[in-house]
Image (spheres, helix red, strand yellow):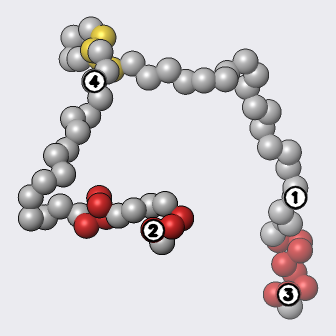
Amino acid sequence: MARTAAPYLHPKMAATEPPPQPHGIDRIEVVFVDASGKEVPFKDPPQLAATGPNTPKQLGVDRSPQGR
């Protein structure tokens, strides 16, 4: 009985169109600000030194096709 009554109690899922995409937006700009709302210039992260006993071994690998 449950299988027979199910179509009357629970609607079937119907295919719907996706919502339209907004036109005219081709990029997003990110601006960093401090607590007062003043714009803060972007700084590149510092480069890490590759020296010491825990340096990954991949740094000295020859990546040319001949070195493989």
Q: Position of residue 64 (x, y in %)?
A: 49, 60
User: Mark on residue 3?
Assistant: 3
Disc 1 residue type (three-letter): Ala
CA–CA distance between discs 3 and 2?
66 Å
Q: Quadrant of residue 2?
A: bottom right
Q: Earlier in the sequence, mark 1 or mark 3?
A: 3
Q: Are marks 1 and 2 in contact (CB under 8 Å)?
A: no
Q: Which residue is located at x 31 percent, y 21 percent?
A: 42
CA–CA distance between discs 4 and 1?
50 Å
Q: Residue 11 vs residue 52: left or right?
A: right
Q: For the residue carrying disc 3, how many other residues have a C-alpha within 10 Å: few (<14), some (14-19), or many (20+)?
A: few
Q: Which residue is located at x 80 percent, y 43 percent?
A: 18
CA–CA distance between discs 1 and 2?
57 Å
Q: Earlier in the sequence, mark 3 or mark 4?
A: 3
What secondary structure is found at the residue carrying circle 2? Answer: helix
Q: In the rendered view of the protein, which quadrant contains the N terminus?
A: bottom right
What secondary structure is found at the residue carrying circle 3? Answer: helix
Q: Residue under circle 2?
A: 67
Q: Position of residue 25 (x, y in %)?
A: 67, 21
Q: Position of residue 44 (x, y in %)?
A: 29, 29
Q: Earlier in the sequence, mark 1 or mark 2?
A: 1
Q: Residue under circle 1?
A: 14
CA–CA distance between discs 2 and 4?
36 Å
Disc 4 residue type (three-letter): Lys
Tell which residue pokes out farthest to the left in this image. 52
Q: Quadrant of residue 57?
A: bottom left
